[in-house]
Image (cartoon, rainbow, N blue to C red):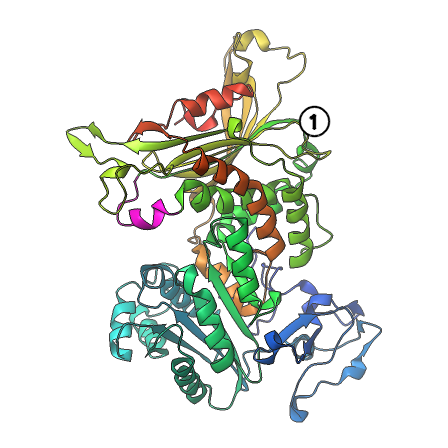
Amino acid sequence: MAFSSPKCPSSRFALPPSPGPRSRRVAAAAYPSPSRAPLPRRFFSTRISSQSPRNRHWRVVSMHEGAATMPVSPEKEIDLKKVENGVASAISAEEHRDLAGLNTSKKDSTVSITVVGASGDLAKKKIFPALFALYYEDCLPEHFTVFGYARSKMTDAELRNMVSRTLTCRIDKRENCSEKMDQFLRRCFYHSGQYDSEENFAELDKKLKEHEAGRLSNRLFYLSIPPNIFIDVVKCASKSASSANGWTRVIVEKPFGRDSESSAALTRGLKEYLVEEQIFRIDHYLGKELVENLSVLRFSNLVFEPLWSRQYIRNVQLIFSEDFGTEGRGGYFDNYGIIRDIMQNHLLQILALFAMETPVSLDAEDIRNEKVKVLRSMRPLQLENVVIGQYKSHTKGGVTYPAYTDDKTVPKDSLTPTFAAAALFIDNARWDGVPFLMKAGKALHTKRAEIRVQFRHVPGNLYKRSFGTDLDRATNELVIRVQPDEAIYLKINNKIPGLGMRLDRSNLNLHYAARYSKEIPDAYERLLLDAIEGERRLFIRSDELDAAWALFTPLLKELEEKKIVPELYPYGSRGPVGAHYLASKYNVRWGDLSCEH
């Protein structure tokens, strides 16, 4: 049964007659019944003022239980007498949304989104299309503007022309696509400036104020730039282009340093001008539909939670593979490698979400607290539990594919791994002894990102003779395919119809494309909307980052100091042989190499 919902599932900026299905945006309690209902603590906000240097230029919103004071103009002031002891009594949905500070669609506020590094590939291919998709779905506030900022000389018209080439109305055809594009592009502007110039950011501030037209201004800066200039941009923006009367938030793209030391230095630099609540460290994999569905699958289905432990799970595999090499970005990649680029962030974040204990609530801090506990419980990676590889040239079907070192931007003697496999362990009561196998690589035989949960063998299996000596054939396996062709399926054993007793292995399959007609939104759409709404659940906190680097930094230093030579594997193959030996060391078989693939 489908639930009716407004066009934008978030409904934060629209005023639907009933709440949408995405309760993490606006909880059901935001639409109270006439009876008395407690107010969730996330809806109470108070503005903090501080004379410290890092707060002088930035307005900060902090959530506190029981606080109900907000900076509102006298004509918009809320009758707080309707709230007694944290309980709302018989107030309308409209009044409740005012009290919660959710009526940001009103004419007295606006959101200004500045994409710093607007001429880069990420901005053109991901950020601007994601913003347009949100606009198309009516998920952005009534008053908003989008500014591109970069060193390239460009006019507003040239920016709009550049952006228009990447926009599509792929989500929904209910509106006139070209008309919606024109409306969106009319809200896009450009300002050219240096990343370390306070004067240029002051000029940007002047333009932003012209478009904000005296409204309560909220500002979001998306740093689509190399990390070595993050601090310069944050410094200039904080001093010259922050909001004077609303919130200011900054989205920071990975990589967040190369190791513990550089990451800590970057965090210290950002916190000279920002507080933690303003920093949104984005890992786009956390915005993918199947990753977000992971906690729903586990915590809202009784059949899974009791099985989610060492007692029933034999191993967990987190697999990422791409069927192309580093074409076009070899210079960047050679400075980081596959471990920093994929494993330390994307796969480790998924692992933490998978393995965490039940959080106290769906509040961002409660979830991130549990993730940090998992990361801090993990054993530091040992070199003996890691295999690295690098793809070499290979000819297939008359086509010759280049080696990693054939890239002109990569040194011929580069030892940077393009493939890595690792066995990780969580030393806590739930997961003690369960190997978490992680594998990531480029130029492999297929493109895939998935989580595979292999359960233990059935004790005293009555039908073991039907499976022969290979009991792994009888093992149940839960597969969460993050991309492509999103799906969740459970492998079970069943009897083949007929008079005999022949067993077969089948899938109980939730195939998203077959089950849901609506196209899955891009991860950047979800994360941008969360940042605008102040929802931090899918963003990385500084102590999470510290714990993640603490796991990988000793290994990375050892690999570089000892100049470990990666095992070569052919372009388009299944990866180095060493990965299979690593898995067999823990009596595990990689699930993505079975006959189904």
The residue located at (50%, 42%) in the rendering is 347
Establish if 475 lies above or below 390. Answer: above
Tell me where residue 540 sits by quadrant. bottom right
In this view, the residue in front, 264 or 161, is 264
- The kind of secondary structure element at disc 1 is loop
Indicate left or right for 355 with 350 as reference.
right
Indicate left or right for 65 with 292 as reference.
right
Q: Is 329 a magenta residue?
A: yes
Q: Quadrant of the C terminus?
A: top left
| Circle 1 residue | 311
Tell me where residue 132 sits by quadrant. bottom left
The residue located at (23%, 31%) in the rendering is 393
- Crowd around label 1: few <14 · some 14–19 · many ≥20 (10 Å): some
Indicate left or right for 150 with 63 as reference.
left
Establish if 370 lies above or below 421. Answer: below
Which residue is situated farthest in the right direction here?
85
The residue located at (74%, 52%) in the rendering is 360
Q: Position of residue 82 (x, y in %)?
A: 79, 80
Q: Which residues are magenta?
A: 324-335
Which residue is situated farthest in the bottom direction here?
75
Q: Position of residue 416 (x, y in %)?
A: 37, 39
Q: Position of residue 207 (x, y in %)?
A: 40, 86
Q: Is 576 a magenta residue?
A: no
In this view, the residue in front, 128 or 341, is 341
In this view, the residue in front, 180 or 239, is 239
Question: Which residue type does callout 1 highlight?
Answer: Gln
Q: Position of residue 133 (x, y in %)?
A: 40, 64
